[in-house]
Amino acid sequence: MDYQQTLDYLFSKLPMFSRIGAAAYRKDLTNTIVLSEFLGRPEKRFPSVHIAGTNGKGSTSHMLAAIFQSAGYRTGLYTSPHLKDFRERIRINGEMIKESFIVDFVQRIRPLSESLDPSFFEVTVAMAFEYFAVEKVDIAIIEVGLGGRLDSTNIIHPELSVITNIGFDHMNMLGNTLPAIAFEKAGIIKKDTPVVIGEHNPETAPVFEQRAHEDNAPLTFADQQRFISDWNYQRHRLTAGVSTSPTADDKEFYTLDLPGIYQTRNLLTVLEAVHRLRALGWKLEQTAVHKGLANVKKLTGLHGRWELVHEHPDVILDVAHNADGMRQLARQIELSDHEELHIVLGMVGDKDIDQALALLPKTAYYYFTKASIPRALPEDRLSEKARSKGLEGKTYPNVMEALSAAKAHARPRDLVLVCGSVFVVGEV
């Protein structure tokens, strides 16, 4: 098979969560372990940091990878899903995995794959671990796909575990309460391995504390170690002052090329992770921290986080897709300088989206659409649900028609926001 045939095989022959949803989710690690053993346990041949969470785990992973790169480490980064190119999922120092490696890897495991019937994600994780081992990375930042306890990435024993936050998402697989979801995320906590929790929540903290106690894992809550004292948002950049107590004067300012205000939460998580990693012997100087945070997009290829892609009118892309993400997005919109607001919105159909829709601004004009995946909620059904929440607009059969209409209707000082699904943003 050539590269395109290999991709077609991966996308069409293997059950893929982004296309079909829960049917592709494997509730155990059996296939991943079989694949790993076939490859000689590549995940044991490099150190790693494991990152889970409902929101912010992608940004946190990229920020941490950018810091390691800036400190001179050869840094692997595994994230999902991809926006445009499959190879975005697996990077070393920002460079995407080689096409030739993908072709050779799939050919090599194909006989096993035919008998094992693994999911797309299980194969992709095995591919990432093999690539990082073969390429001899100094460290790999590994983002959990879904949940934690039963996620394919959870065969690693990392240097540090990070859980950004807990919110309502994928409840059909992870549970209907915050403690139930936290239990699944806490599954990445490993014996004698430090763990950083990004946000303290009275409902979920006992779950993490109990698991950490059982595994003798030193635990810290990032938002109890440092505090955002002030911040300044200027279109392409966010500057945040960080202090060690709410009243302290020991402010240090960090500038991020990820301008979303919600990144202040991820910043605190990243800084505590850096602190813990330094204690383990990793040389992460402050100059590298500042350089990495200021150049995340350039160093790691991150997209879709309050990303400005067009001016006059401003067109901004954001992958927010659940209630917590929409809450942060609504706050960001309030802080933005614009006249009228146009929102291109598409969502997947296997989630509880009513709560997310209720958080979106009623003053915007909406362009309801759907991504080109089976899981996408049809635009007319999305429009009906949105109308019940007081959101008004028209329907469009595909993302590009919706975006074209929004840009045509928008005046130079208006804001066009594309959100609701990673797959909608990916198409743009």
Image (tube, rainbow, N blue to C red):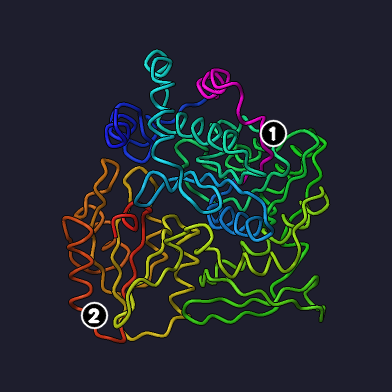
Quadrant assignment for the N terminus: top left
Residue 388 showing in the rendered view:
yes
Count of labels in the image? 2
- Which quarter of the image is occupied by the C terminus? bottom left
Mark 1 lies on residue? 157
Which residue is labeled 2 in the image? 410
What residue is rendered at 36% in x and 48% in y? Answer: 85
Q: For numbered disc 1, what is the local secondary structure?
A: loop
Name the one closer to the observer, 414 or 137: 137
Residue at image position (78%, 57%) is: 275
Left or right: residue 426 compared with residue 56:
left
* Residue 363 in view in this figure: no
Res. 330 image quadrant: bottom left
- 226 sits to left or right of 239: right
- Magenta segment includes 118: no
- Percent from the top left, x then y, of residue 223? 71, 62
**Percent x, y of residue 303:** 43, 60
| Residue drawn at the location 66% of the way across and 80% of the way down | 230
Could you say which disc has been placed on residue 366 in the image? none
The amino acid at mark 1 is His
Residue 6 is left or right of residue 263, and the answer is left
Few, some or many residues within 10 Å of mark 1 (<14, 14–19, 20+) = many
Task: Point out the frontmost of discs 1 and 2.
Answer: 1
Mark 1 → mark 2, Cα distance in angstroms: 50 Å
**Amino acid at pointer 2:** Ala
Q: Which residues are magenta?
A: 29-51
Q: Nearer the viewer, residue 182 or 414?
A: 414
Is the Cβ of the residue at disc 1 closer than 8 Å to that at disc 2? Answer: no
